[in-house]
Image (tube, helix red, strand yellow):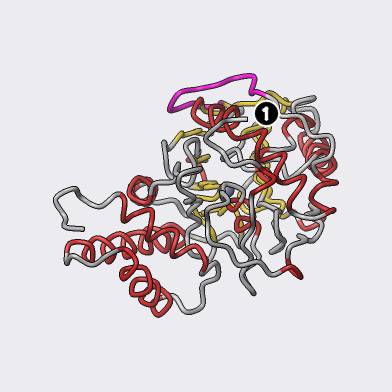
Amino acid sequence: MSTHLPNPDVTRRTFMAGAASAIVATALVGCGGEVPVEVTPSTSDIPDPVIDVSGASEVARDIMIIPDRGKTFVPNIGIIGGRDSVLIVDTGMGQENAEKVLDYAVKYARGRKLYLTTTHFHPEHAYGADIITKDATYLANKAQIEDLHRKGQPYLTMFRHDFGAAVAKRLDKVQLVDPTITYDRDYDLDLGGRVVQLRATGQAHTMGDQLVIVPDVKMVFTGDLVETHQFAIFPWYPPSDVDVSGVRWREVMRKAIADAPSIVVPGHGNVGDISRLTDTHGYLDELIQETWKQTAEGKSVEDIVPAVKELMFQRHPEWIGREWVEKGIRCVHTEAPKTASR
Ligand SMILES: [Zn+2]
């Protein structure tokens, strides 16, 4: 285990009423014992994060989405077909879920070669790769592999211990596996008559986030860089975990918007259009601008947090994941220009 990560035994969880989304729990595993916590024991056991392939639907030609159905620790999973090959995007949490995804993909592929890629290393997105790689060639970017090597095992241990019996059972026999093919920044995967662009974004929600772009249908899979109607997830737990960057994340969103996709598949929540990206970019920009403005005015971070939080809640009253706003403020506060007064 990395010495930079907290001991799972002292890791605590925060669950806010009404905001028990998958990524809430995902990011919280970076939480060290020094982090203030609110614990609601009745919600500490995550419901069984089971994937149901029966809800899969074709969102573009030869591209299926197995939807998250709003379930905690269940991601949106993509199956992207080409003439010769089929690419699976994300695995679901644990071996049994991954078996379902693989079985679905094998049937869907009807003899086509299988590939797997993962949007980032978090457990519901990547901790089924050991099963899917039995039949699929696994591709991921180098930074994501470094995330997996550095934090993969601690995350696995913590998820097995801290999120209830159903999650522990899902992860019981999981083995972390390396990809067959690694790339640095860009990889173009030719599925036959369709090229899928794998694009490492660099540091944002994690160090190894990846966009999966299907140019011929102007579609992008974002992983947890984008969620539907939710405040951006900042796994900001200094000193244990400070890998997230609001400033870089905003830039990643700006570039993704410039590509003008028509279909955006978030990590969690309903598939949508480019507004999924502009929503996230807009929020990150507001968060940074407001936090930096108040920093420049000489306010302390302890004064900035409640003020900016309130502003964000007013601007997005319907969004979930409110507990992530403070972590976002504290993260981007550290990214403020050095010339600003503190
Ligand atoms: Zn995530």
Q: Residues within 10 Å of mark 1 (few under 14, many from 20)?
A: many
Residue appearing at x 73%, y 45% in the figure? 92
Q: Nearer the viewer, residue 284 or 34?
A: 34
Quarter of the image that includes the C terminus? bottom left
Residue 181 rendering spot, x and y as whole percentages: 59, 20
Residue appearing at x 43%, y 57% in the figure? 277
Pointer 1: what residue? 115
Q: Amino acid at mark 1?
A: Tyr
Element type at mark 1: strand
Q: Relative to residue 9, is residue 190 depicted above or below?
A: above
Q: Relative to residue 231, is residue 240 depicted above or below?
A: above
Is residue 177 a member of the stretch shown in magenta? no
Rendered image quadrant of residue 90: top right
Q: Is residue 303 left or right of residue 69?
A: left
Residue appearing at x 82%, y 57% in the figure? 48
Q: Is residue 34 left or right of residue 44?
A: left
What span is in magenta?
Answer: 178-189
Rendered image quadrant of residue 154: top right
For the image, the number of numbered tags is 1
Quarter of the image that includes the N terminus? top right
Residue 239 rendering spot, x and y as whole percentages: 46, 44
Q: Nearer the viewer, residue 121 or 116?
A: 121
